[in-house]
Image (cartoon, rainbow, N blue to C red):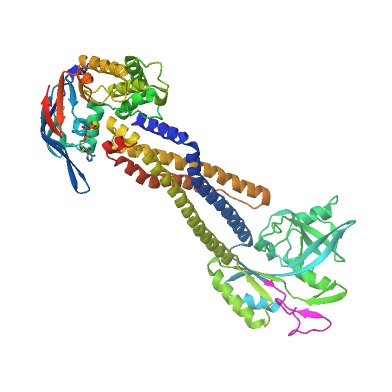
């Protein structure tokens, strides 16, 4: 059986090489079918992994409530005095959230855009006024120093935690911890440096950014006032936004119910659309759902292209059987059994489809590589997709080769011998 | 080479009929055939075109089955064998030589000669050696790597003879082996068959050339699907 099998494969390859161009063209269907499927899977997997990673950065048991500027600029229904727009999340909202039993932590955040300066060095920072719990919830590594403390909040201390990026820009050539820097005209002492993971860009907003500077919320309100004045295009724009963000940590199992509760509560007290809930867990589920849909679509495309490839193979094999009818007759007269003839043609189709599949895998590896190279999109080729496509291309060979092979084997030897 | 004379393999036909059916019409190709062929004999089958010579040879070669009657080959009742059984019998006991050689054009001379051994699933290095020996026997050992299309008709038929001998068959069946050859080349092939018969191979040959039939020790004359007479 062993010698026979080896010789069959050799003979099959020889026969395919004999009609090189024809075999190649037949194979192309499989090559592009398998290649495009692997490439698409790689792109899809890459995108979904990136999305997942970003979502996980948000923490799957967190809910992020953001202030958004309402469509009317916070003007009409709120007090508009001297161009003052008032909108957004309130300290009262935080107090109301405290009554939710499923909420474990609440961290209010106020954001200002300020310039930080040390000597001649300066950078634009996103000044984050928040509570010490921020560092528990967002959970980033400290490069040096300490996070904000409750004492800082209580005493309205002028202390700041910088991100590694901001520290590098600002503190170059100076000592880091204990250094005094000017932020928006006030002097703050650097007490810690934290490694930021935000700012990578993408679909999901991570709570932190690379150019953050964290100060106690109480200090922010004390030093910079509660009204943010911005000058833009000659006009002065004044905004009263108490809080830009509230981070809420919830028991993992009640995320969705709590989110519904929070939304209902906020809608009751906010007459304008000036807040937005981000629920990482919902995003996660949505991402998984999207991926599933994507895979179904991909599977259908793969199925169709493999079907087309398979039909191409079957077509060629049927032609080949007709062409080689006399050879089949000769082999039968010499003593080949039906199973030998089936084997001969089946080996040929499987060799054809498997070679096509392997070439397709090579193509499918190259395309994502190029995509990553050219566009920077992340692509991930999973081993499973390779094994699966190889197995499927072999199966296509067997399925679509079986009918021509059986037809060949069922030929009457005498009739086949007389064929010319 | 194994001595075929030691393999006892007779043919016995009793009241054999062969009827072909084509679209409702029936053609009686063979009618009431009774005869026996002993081991080591050399038979010629003669008769006018359409007399049923090829039909008879196909039956004897287990490529076909009688419509009715008994056919025993090498002690086996053919009617009890399925397609696999018939193939097995062809593979182990029979060798075919055809009028138009029927070599496989894609294979080399050596591969063509080896073909029956391929289905016997023998060790491939021994197969090579056997193909070599057979090529020497038919005088073509310098052409082993050639394709059939690169050979003359006579050479091709010699390859076919070598191939028919590869499985060391008990019976050689030849349907007009000289039909596509000129008389000188035909004579060479016939001398070769005669030699094989002298070494003990049973040979059954269809021909309509009287000069070729003289090589055989017995001749069966057919007419309209019936045995006309023996000579
Ligand atoms: N497969 C077949 N289907 C139908 N009829 C057949 C078939 N094979 C042979 N016949 C018929 O059987 C009869 C005998 O044919 P056969 O081929 O045996 O003749 P033959 O003696 O070999 O003739 P020739 O000398 O021309 O080769 C013919 O009438 C032929 O038409
Ligand atoms: Mg004939």
Q: How many marks?
A: 0
Q: Quadrant of the C terminus of chain A?
A: top left
The answer to whether one can see residue B121 in this image is no
Q: As rendered, which of B65 and A344 lies closer to the eye?
A: B65
Q: As rendered, which of A51 and A357 lies closer to the eye?
A: A357
Which of the 4 quarters of the picture holds residue B229? top left
Q: As rendered, which of A7 and A94 lies closer to the eye?
A: A7
* Ligand 2 - quadrant of the structure image: top left
Task: Determine whether B28 is above or below A305 in the image.
Answer: above
Task: Determine whether B123 is above or below A272 in the image.
Answer: above
Which of the 4 quarters of the picture holds residue B82? top left
Q: What x and y, as percent, mark residue B181?
A: 32, 22
Q: What x and y, as percent, mark residue B32?
A: 10, 35
Task: Determine whether A166 is above or below A415 in the image.
Answer: below
Please give the name of the residue rendered at 82% of the width and 65% of the height, measured from the top-left corner: A114
Q: What x and y, as percent, mark residue A174?
A: 85, 51
**Outermost residue toward the right in this view:** A120
Q: What x and y, as percent, mark residue A252?
A: 55, 66
Please give the name of the residue rendered at 18% of the width and 26% of the height, measured from the top-left corner: B45
Q: Going by the image, does B74 lie left or right of A214? A: left
Task: Determine whether A236 is above or below B83 in the image.
Answer: below
Q: As rendered, which of A351 and A179 lies closer to the eye?
A: A351
Magenta residues? A66-90
Does residue A78 show up magenta in the picture?
A: yes
Q: Main secondary structure of the magenta part?
A: loop
Does residue A77 show up magenta in the picture?
A: yes
Q: Going by the image, does B64 lie left or right of B33? A: right
Please give the name of the residue rendered at 77% of the width and 64% of the height, measured from the top-left corner: A126
């Amino acid at each position: 059986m062993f010698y026979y099998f080896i010789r069959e494969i050799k003979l099959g390859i020889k026969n395919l090489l004999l009609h090189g161009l024809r075999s190649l063209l037949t194979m192309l269907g499989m090559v592009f079918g398998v290649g495009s499927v692997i490439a698409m899977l790689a792109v899809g997997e890459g995108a979904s992994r990136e999305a997942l990673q970003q979502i996980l950065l948000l923490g799957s048991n967190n809910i992020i409530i953001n202030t958004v500027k309402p469509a009317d600029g916070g003007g009409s229904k709120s007090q508009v005095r001297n161009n003052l727009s008032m909108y957004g999340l309130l300290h009262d909202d935080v107090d109301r959230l405290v009554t939710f039993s499923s909420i474990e932590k609440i961290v209010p955040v106020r954001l200002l855009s300020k310039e930080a300066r040390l000597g001649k060095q300066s950078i634009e920072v996103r000044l984050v006024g928040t509570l010490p719990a921020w560092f528990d919830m967002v959970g980033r590594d400290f490069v040096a120093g300490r996070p904000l403390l409750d004492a800082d909040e209580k005493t309205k201390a002028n202390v700041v935690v910088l991100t590694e990026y901001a520290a590098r820009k600002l503190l170059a050539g100076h000592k880091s911890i204990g250094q005094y820097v000017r932020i928006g005209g006030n002097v703050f002492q650097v007490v810690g440096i934290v490694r930021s993971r935000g700012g990578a860009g993408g679909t999901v907003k991570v709570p932190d950014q690379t150019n953050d500077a964290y100060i106690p919320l109480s200090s922010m309100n004390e030093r910079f006032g509660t009204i943010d004045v911005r000058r833009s295009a000659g006009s002065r724009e004044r905004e009263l936004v108490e809080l830009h963000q509230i981070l809420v940590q919830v028991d993992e199992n009640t995320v969705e119910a709590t989110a519904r509760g929070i939304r209902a509560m906020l809608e009751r007290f906010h007459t304008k659309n000036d807040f937005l809930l981000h629920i990482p867990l919902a995003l996660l589920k949505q991402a998984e759902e999207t991926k599933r849909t994507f895979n179904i679509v991909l599977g259908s495309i793969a199925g169709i292209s493999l079907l087309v490839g398979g039909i191409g193979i079957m077509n060629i094999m049927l032609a080949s059987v007709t062409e080689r009818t006399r050879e089949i007759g000769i082999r039968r007269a010499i003593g080949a059994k039906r199973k030998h003839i089936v084997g001969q043609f089946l080996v040929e189709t499987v060799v054809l489809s498997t070679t096509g599949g392997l070439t397709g895998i090579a193509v499918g590896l190259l395309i994502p590589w190029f995509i990553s190279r050219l566009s920077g999109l992340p692509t991930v080729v999973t081993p499973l997709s390779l094994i699966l496509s190889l197995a499927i291309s072999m199966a296509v060979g067997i399925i679509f080769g079986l009918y021509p092979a059986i037809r060949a084997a069922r030929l009457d030897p005498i009739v086949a011998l007389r064929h010319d | 080479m194994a001595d075929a004379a030691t393999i006892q393999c007779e043919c016995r036909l009793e009241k054999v009929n062969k009827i072909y059916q084509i679209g409702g019409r029936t053609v009686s190709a063979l009618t009431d055939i009774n005869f026996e062929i002993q081991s080591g004999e050399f038979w010629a089958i003669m008769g006018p075109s359409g007399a049923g010579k090829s039909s008879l040879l196909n039956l004897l070669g287990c490529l076909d089955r009688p419509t009715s009657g008994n056919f025993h080959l090498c002690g086996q009742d053919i009617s009890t064998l399925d397609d696999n059984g018939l193939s097995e019998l062809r593979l182990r006991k029979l060798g075919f030589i055809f009028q138009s050689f029927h070599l496989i054009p894609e294979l080399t001379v050596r591969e063509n000669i080896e073909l029956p051994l391929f289905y016997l699933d023998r060790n491939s290095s021994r197969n090579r050696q056997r193909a070599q020996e057979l090529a020497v026997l038919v005088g073509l050992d310098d052409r082993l790597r050639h394709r059939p299309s690169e050979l003359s008709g006579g050479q091709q038929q010699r390859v076919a003879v070598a191939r028919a001998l590869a499985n060391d068959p008990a019976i050689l069946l030849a349907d007009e082996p000289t039909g596509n050859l000129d008389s000188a080349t035909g004579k060479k092939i016939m001398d070769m068959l005669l030699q094989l018969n002298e070494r003990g191979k049973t040979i059954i040959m269809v021909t309509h050339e009287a000069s070729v039939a003289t090589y055989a020790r017995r001749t069966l004359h057919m007419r309209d699907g019936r045995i006309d007479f023996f000579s």
